[in-house]
Image (cartoon, coloured by chain):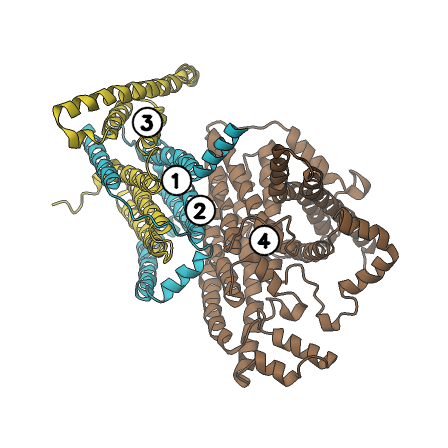
Chain colours: A cyan, B yellow, C brown
Amino acid sequence: MEQFELLTNWAQANVESFMLYLLAAIAIPCAFSVLFDRAIIRSGFFLIGVFGAISGLFLILQAQFLALAQIMIYAVGITLVVVIALMLTNARLEKEFSSIEPTERIGGLLVAALFFLTIYLALRSESWPVSSLQMRADNVLQIGVALLTNYALPFEFASVLLLAALMGAILLAKSDPKETENVTGSLVE
Amino acid sequence: MIKENENVKAMNSSAVPVSIAFAVVVVGMVGVYVCGHLVVWLQNLGLNSFASYPELFVFIAIILLAMLAAAMPGSHRISIISIAAFAGFVALTYNQEILIKYLSLAALLFSIGMYGMVASRNAVRVLMSIELMLNAVNLNLVAFARYVDPVHVRGQVFAIFILTVAAAEAAVGLAIVLAIYRNTATVDMEKFNLLKW
Amino acid sequence: MIPNAAEIRKLSVLSFSWLTVIFVAVWGVCWLVGILIPALLANSSFDFARAVSEICEAITPLLAVMVFIPINAMFMVLMERRVLALFTRRNGPNRVGPDGALQTAADAIKLLLKEDITPTGADAAMFTLAPIIFFAPSIFGAIPLLAAVTNNNKLFQIADLPTGIFFVLAASSIPVVGIVMGGWASNNKYSLMGGLRSAAQAISYEIPLVLSIITICLLAGTLDVVSIAKQQSGGILNWNILGGGALTGLNKAIAAFISSAGPPIAEVIKTYYPYGWLSLIGVIVLCLCTIILFGIYLIGACAEINRIPFDLPEAESELVSGYNTEYSGIKFAIFFLAEFTNLFIVSTIAVVMFLGGGDCPLPTWLNPLSYPAVYIPLTNILSPILSLLIDKIHLINPDTFWAALWVILKTYSLVFFAILVRGTLPRFRIDQLMDFGWKRLVPITLVIFVLVAFARGVINFHV
């Protein structure tokens, strides 16, 4: 019985780590699948897996609002746009990774690995000022207040950026009027 | 006929991933053991600063394994690399603070995204890799907000800005890719060389 | 003289019996798992028994949803077919069971026993995953709503979710991924077209949908579903559809006028509407805005769940059956189940956000039949039995019962409205759909958002 209690205490103390590793076990294979999957549309769907796992991590980190925004914006919005773009750009044409030059691949791998190594070693050698305070449950209120007081200017800039991006995307993606005429003409013929 | 042959081939090779995963684990364990001895040896040599990071050897072993797997043909490459990366992640972080676990995971995802950005040929896949990197940065910020700055959650505020920028970037990037595709009928990064010289 | 009065009578008897079955089944399971088992285990001295009772209490909301969804979807399919038949002067299903009441149960059994086919060239893993991704969010999305629709019954209070409505919205935005996935994995061009259309439609119409909900949250001052539902108690004048609480002062003033016991009317009006004419304009603007918002929410929700007139992803005259062309057997059953569950959940969100949740529509001052009054004479007659049921074994919880009854009534009215729309309107064309979404609904919602933000300042809410 005592051992059972010890076990429960240990599990309770480490529950966050377990959840972290569980979600990492989802996120890491999905991330690799995004890079290496043959069918590129499937890798688009794997991207949803990565985003979902990261939103689960946000939930563990008590960032409810961000987790839900992550699901709504990333996992559904952006990824669906990506998948549609993949479907529009005829994904069957690509023979990816089979024809890429090995030097480039190894170079990229080395850069990525050394980058990870650098960050990891830097993380370990630093002593972080971890705060023992608990977060407030309704931190969405704090975020809202911060966005409209201290960060009002970046907030406005972000909105201008979004507007510009929206207009730019529409203008870029709009097909030429001439082309459209040709297409309709051929359809009529 | 051809189809059947392929099926038979696939069935025969289905035992391969399991055995390779097993081999990865065994080799990894042996590697850790050997690395432990190497550490002592290096310490005796006097390279103390280098030897104080024993995880480095685990990491190098994992990288070698991943390179081996990447060099191998077949569709089981992804599972091997994933197992190697996850095992490496756990080995590197299991006795660290919880904050460092989050930050390491974010760094790992960022590196994966970086590799994809460098090595992919499909422009849309490059965009996906960039999204992955932005998400890893978000994870970093939220982890900091939880553990370093839980009172004013500044990390979460910045994560919201990154979310906005990522959405704008995805929209514009995909629109550019579509425009290029309309003109050149390809999304291969190697062929986007109109402005090269 | 109504021409098909007999049909209507049959339909109402059928609906009443089905709803009773749903009610009894769901509450029976909740009572058994959430109250009876923990009560039986309460006196036990084992640690293990305590753990079991805790687990039982924790899974009660999940169990309630899991029992509710299949039975409810069966009834909704039956109701849809019968009501459509009523509109088109047909008979509808009337062979299996009394008056065809068991038709959908038979259909469900048939679908479960059918062979499960994966087409050649399909991506088998994605093909299997798609119905699950389509269905699972509706379960998670329904759980935070449970506490709101049962008058905050403590059985259904889950871990604190200050962003409740946002959670529900996020969950209800996931199913489109399942549609696109299924459409692509089927290796069928009609399915693919259905999936693509669904993605474009869902992304476009999610914006007005979420904006309309967010405007209501702005009025309510909270994202918590339970408190939004609670703020609206006290009759139709307090509901969010009429000004989002702007008429609360009017409600109080009339109550003061009738009872003449409380504070004088002028004082009440002064408290709630401090700026005279400006406040009056604010009230009128708010009332108009919220009514338009309700309409926009219904349109956006219709598009989000692919109902007619927005059923382009499965337009059977153009795309065979759209994204679920290749599905059969249990996977098709899951798609079907999820579609109707999504309709129900979307209606429930509308009820909680706009129509007062589990609140009686009559204002308290106009309500000689308000439920405590009905309930008290009944208690006098049946007091021994009722006190046994309510206080001893907690089989009946009056608050929860009346709230759930009102929610069910309102929700099914909205479902009925959806069926009416289905029987009436033709399908949009895809370019009309996009034009309507982006050029009409989004600007209107944005303008309303700004108007509400200004009009909110001239009135005192929820004093």
* Mark 4 or mark 3, whichever is nearer to me: 3
- What residue did someone put label 3 on? B84
* Quarter of the image where one finds residue A115: top left
Q: As shown in the figure, which amino acid type bears the numbered disc 2?
A: Leu
Question: Which is in the foreground here, disc 1 or disc 4?
Answer: 1
Residue B132 x/y as whole percent: 33, 43
* Contact check, label 3 and label 1, Cβ < 8 Å: no
Subunit under mark 3: B
User: What percent of the width, then of the height, locates residue A87?
Assistant: 39, 41
SS category of the residue bearing label 1: helix
Tell me, for residue C394, which label it has, or none.
Answer: none
Quarter of the image where the C terminus of chain C is located:
bottom right
Q: What chain does badge 1 belong to?
A: A
Mark 2 — residue? A59
Residue indicated by mark 1? A50
- Tag in front: 3 or 1: 3
* Residue C267 point in image, percent of width and height: 62, 83
Let me know if residue C317 appears in the view: no
Circle 3: residue type: Ala
Q: Is residue B120 left or right of residue A62?
A: left
Q: Position of residue B41 (x, y in %)?
A: 17, 21
- Which numbered disc, 1 or 2, marks the residue closer to the eye? 2
Q: Are marks 2 and 3 on the same chain?
A: no
Q: Share a chain, discs 4 and 3?
A: no
